Amino acid sequence: HYLLRYNVLPSDMYSHNLLLQRRRSDDALRLYLIDGLGSHVALPLNNFIRSLGARTILKHCRKFCTSVAKASGGRIILQP
């Protein structure tokens, strides 16, 4: 939700670029992107056109969820 709201574009989303934190108060999980920000493109139009940015963000999120699900043998549901 944060990435989409503020149009923060990930360059890559790998498990070693993410931090998972569980809050003690309510056992909620939070996911933080700690590396892999920015565009690989010389003229990043998706920084300026939000619909293109959202498409890029969702593409990276889907790719990450698929790779984690394959590695864990489980299933992840992406809810933007």
Image (cartoon, helix red, strand yellow):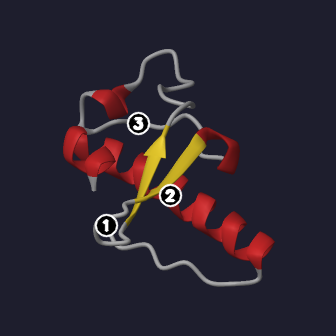
Q: Earlier in the sequence, mark 2 or mark 1?
A: 2
Between 20 and 37, the one nearer to me in the picture? 20
Quick one: SS at disc 2?
helix
Mark 2 → mark 3, Cα distance in angstroms: 11 Å
Identify which amino acid the numbered label 2 is placed on: Cys
Q: Which residue is mark 2?
A: 61
| Callout 2 crowding tier (Cα within 10 Å): few <14, some 14–19, many ≥20 | many
Which quarter of the figure has residue 27?
bottom left
| Picture coordinates of residue 67, whole percent (x, y) | 71, 65
Identify which amino acid the numbered label 1 is placed on: Pro
Between 45 and 14, the one nearer to me in the picture? 14
- Please name the residue shown 68% across and 67% down the image: 68
- Please name the residue shown 35% across and 34% down the image: 46
Q: Earlier in the sequence, mark 1 or mark 3?
A: 3
**For residue 62, side relative to residue 55 (left or right):** right
- Please name the residue shown 57% across and 45% down the image: 18
| Picture coordinates of residue 51, whole percent (x, y) | 26, 48
| Callout 1 crowding tier (Cα within 10 Å): few <14, some 14–19, many ≥20 | few
- Please name the residue shown 45% across and 45% down the image: 32
Identify which amino acid the numbered label 3 is placed on: Leu
Quick one: SS at disc 3?
loop
Residue 9 marker: 3
